[in-house]
Image (tube, rainbow, N blue to C red):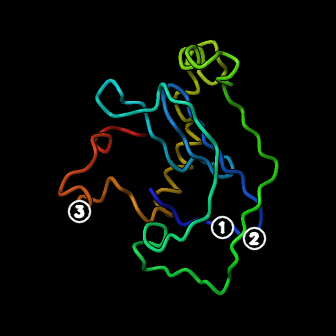
Amino acid sequence: MQFRPWFDPTADYHNYTIFWNQCMIVWFIDDIPIRVFRNYSAQGVPFPTRRQMYAFSSIWAAEDWATQGGRVKTDWTKAPFVAEYRDINLRVCDCASYGAAGCPDSCASSSNWYAAPDLCQLSEKQLKQMRAVQLGYTIYDYCADGKRYNGTVPLECSMRQY
């Protein structure tokens, strides 16, 4: 999915969060969920249950995908493009403390804070926030792009994400 921000992202800092547990991956902006990808691995949908997450960023010339297929042109007179970060907080299961072999199982343990049952679903407030963002600011949804997938869509698109 791709969204048009409801704010000017260059005017101030914003809090971008990825919450990933055994049930779902949720993307947030300023504590507002914008997208959920639920774990339907039992139904054949790939889900990163035994993968480590890495944090990195880059700036690239995205003249197609990030510009709505080239409809929105990059204004190169604004270059150089600079991203700044502050107050980065990574709350993670540190795989190094378990060793490579034990990491996936130890990090998936139900004793971890992020594995609590109430963190396997959005609250009613979060659900309303996400629906409002998706209704008002989605500019691309791969689940609605049958042309990209030759008349079909990926399996997860037929399953309830929320």
User: Which residue type carries mark 3?
Assistant: Lys
> What is the crowding at mark 2: few (fewer than 14 residues within 10 Å), some, or many (at least 20)?
few
In space, the residues marked 3 and 2 are separated at their CA atoms by: 36 Å
Instruction: Please name the residue shown 24% across and 55% down the image.
Output: 149
* Three-letter amino acid code of the residue under disc 2: Ala
Is mark 2 in CB contact (under 8 Å) with mark 1? yes
Q: Secondary structure at mark 1?
A: loop
Q: Residues within 10 Å of mark 1 (few under 14, many from 20)?
A: few
Residue beneath disc 2: 11
**Relative image position of residue 160 (x, y in whole percent):** 35, 38
The residue depicted at 53 percent of the width and 27 percent of the height is: 120
Residue drawn 62% across and 58% down?
Answer: 58
Q: Which residue is mark 1?
A: 7
Q: Position of residue 72 (x, y in %)?
A: 48, 79
Residue 134 % position (x, y)? 48, 56
Which element carries disc 3, helix, strand or loop?
A: loop
Q: Which mark is residue 147?
A: 3
Q: State which quarter of the image contains the N terminus.
A: bottom left
- 6 up-or-down from 72: above or below: above
How many neighbours does mark 3 have within 10 angstroms: few (below 14), some (14-19), or many (20 or more)? few
